Structures are given as structure tokens and as C-alpha cells.
Image (cartoon, rainbow, N blue to C red):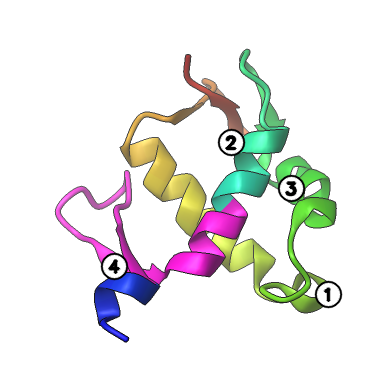
């Protein structure tokens, strides 16, 4: 199977000139879970709150017992933020919300 079928190129808001190729199925599973739980209005959820909220939405096939969910959450978060699909609210800690 060609690499283009199983991989997706993602960006990083913190490193705009850098991209990575990652597993498409895991990316999409995390993307769908994250987008289903993020609010549309700021301030949004902290990353820790988002992780707790999305864990029940993740496929056990891709994330058995939540394994590696934190890494994938961060990867998808930084990619979607670089594409301006989600945004950070001002202040600390980092709080995420959808962009409309």
C-alpha cells in the first residue's frame, strides 16, 4: 500500500516550516475526538481537561487504554492550531477552543 494512503502530513504552530508524516488513522481518530469535545467559545478547555473528555471517544483499536493519547492530542492540537481550526485563549494554562 502506498505511503500516501496510510500517512498524513501535519504541521506545528510553533515550527511553521516543519512538518511530519504520521499515521492517518490515528490522526483522524484523535482529530474527530478532539473536535467533538472542544467548545466553540473561549476560553475553552485546558489540554488536561480535553484529554479527559476525549478519552471515552477514542477507539480502543487505535488507543488501547488511552495509550499514547497525550502525544497524539498534542500533535493534532498543534496541527489544527497551525491551520487555524482551533485556537488558544489568552493566558495560562493553555486553553483550546474551536474557531468558527
Q: How many marks?
A: 4
Q: Nearer the viewer, mark 1 or mark 2?
A: 1
Foreground residue, 6 or 72? Answer: 6
Q: Which residue is mark 1?
A: 65
Q: Earlier in the sequence, mark 2 or mark 4?
A: 4
Q: Is residue 95 above or below residue 61?
A: above
Q: Give left or right: position of 76 versus 57.
A: left
Q: Image point 60% across, 58% down: which residue?
A: 29
Between the residue at mark 1 and the residue at mark 4, the CA separation in whole angstroms equals 25 Å
Q: Is residue 82 above or below residue 96?
A: below
Q: Are marks 3 and 1 in contact (CB under 8 Å)?
A: no
Between the residue at mark 3 and the residue at mark 4, the CA separation in whole angstroms equals 24 Å
Q: Earlier in the sequence, mark 3 or mark 2?
A: 3
Which type of secondary structure does the marked residue at label 1 adopt?
helix
Which type of secondary structure does the marked residue at label 4 adopt?
strand
Q: Which mark is residue 20?
A: 4
Q: Which residue is mark 2?
A: 94
Q: Earlier in the sequence, mark 3 or mark 1?
A: 3
Where is residue 42 shown, x and y percent of the image?
61, 15
Q: Image point 36% across, 29% down: which residue?
A: 84
Q: Are marks 3 and 2 in contact (CB under 8 Å)?
A: no
Amino acid at each position: 500500500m502506498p505511503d500516501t494512503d496510510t500517512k498524513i502530513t501535519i504541521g506545528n504552530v510553533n515550527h511553521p516550516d516543519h512538518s511530519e508524516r504520521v499515521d492517518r488513522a490515528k490522526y483522524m481518530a484523535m482529530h474527530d475526538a478532539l473536535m467533538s469535545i472542544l467548545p466553540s467559545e473561549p476560553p475553552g478547555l485546558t489540554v488536561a481537561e480535553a484529554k479527559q473528555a476525549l478519552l471515552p471517544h477514542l477507539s480502543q483499536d487505535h488507543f488501547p487504554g488511552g495509550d499514547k493519547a497525550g502525544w497524539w492530542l498534542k500533535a493534532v492540537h498543534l496541527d489544527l492550531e497551525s491551520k487555524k481550526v482551533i485556537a488558544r485563549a489568552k493566558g495560562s494554562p493553555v486553553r483550546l477552543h474551536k474557531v468558527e
